[in-house]
Amino acid sequence: MAQKPKSNALAVWGVVFVAVLAFASTYAIYLYYQPEEPIAPIQDEALPNEAEVNDEESVVEENDTGAVKDWTIYSDEVISFNYPADWYDKKENDFIIFTSWDPQVSPERGEQGMRLVVGHVRTGMSLEQYVGDYLNQNINFDPTFSLLARENTVFGGQPAIMVQSATTLEGGSVIQSMFTLRGDELWSIDLVGKILNQDFQIIFDKITNTFSFK
């Protein structure tokens, strides 16, 4: 039997190779130009978006009024100032006493109780002399008292001195006082509490910052 020429076999394989190459090229071009499906962004449902965070922060800032939400105004013919609306007050001679608890229900203040004393006395001393005498009598010569701070400031639009002290009396107390001289009258304001914390300081600052003489 006669054999087929090798050239015919090579020709067949060449045709097959060209066909395969053409198909591969066509398929590659198809894939290249095939539009990609958009990838959906990853949503983190656990975290609020930036707008929600800003809204929450603004609400907190608007509602954050400090230690006391409701304040009222004390006013007479000489002075005025803001104080917590739910405090109780009574007058004793030239002093007005405010308490954060009802003294008719509980004569003693609790751990969070505060007492505010506002009053004035006539004196021939200067402001520095009066405060120096106050420190001598109540702190320097009394072992139950200790001085925490003393600084010059302004109170009711007048030069003033702020004194912060502590005492072991009444189960332990912190006393923050403001003194100012108006004519021959020495005005003082004392906030007394058992715990010197942020609420205590916010209340004292708001009372003293709103204090004014008429």
Image (cartoon, rainbow, N blue to C red):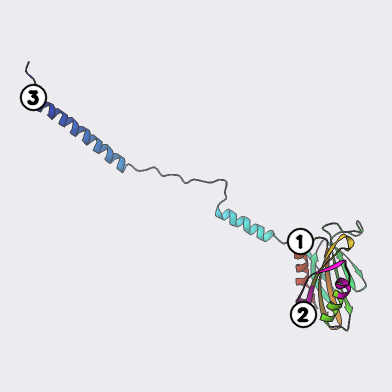
Residue 91 badge: none
Q: Position of residue 168 (x, y in %)?
A: 87, 63
Q: Secondary structure at mark 1?
A: loop
List the residue tagged with mark 3: 5
Q: Which mark is residue 197?
A: 1
Indicate which disc, 2 or 3, sits on the residue closer to the N terminus.
Answer: 3
Q: Which residue is mark 2?
A: 159
Which comes before the other along the chain, label 2 or label 1?
2
| Residue ID at (53%, 46%) | 44
**Residue 160's spot in the image, x, y percent?**
78, 77
Point out the stretch of residues depicted in magenta. 136-162
Instruction: Point out residue 3 in the picture as x, y percentages from the top left corner.
Output: 8, 20
- Where's residue 176, x and y in %? 81, 68
- Label 3 secondary element: loop
Q: How far apart are labels 2 and 1 at the CA level?
A: 26 Å
In the rendered structure, does residue 196 fall within the stretch colored magenta?
no
Q: Quadrant of the C terminus?
A: bottom right
Q: Residue at x 83, y 71 (%)?
A: 189
| Vertical position of residue 155 compared to residue 204: above or below | below
Helix, strand or loop under label 2 = strand
Which of the marked residues, 3 or 1, is nearer the chain's N terminus?
3
Q: Residues within 10 Å of mark 1 (few under 14, many from 20)?
A: few
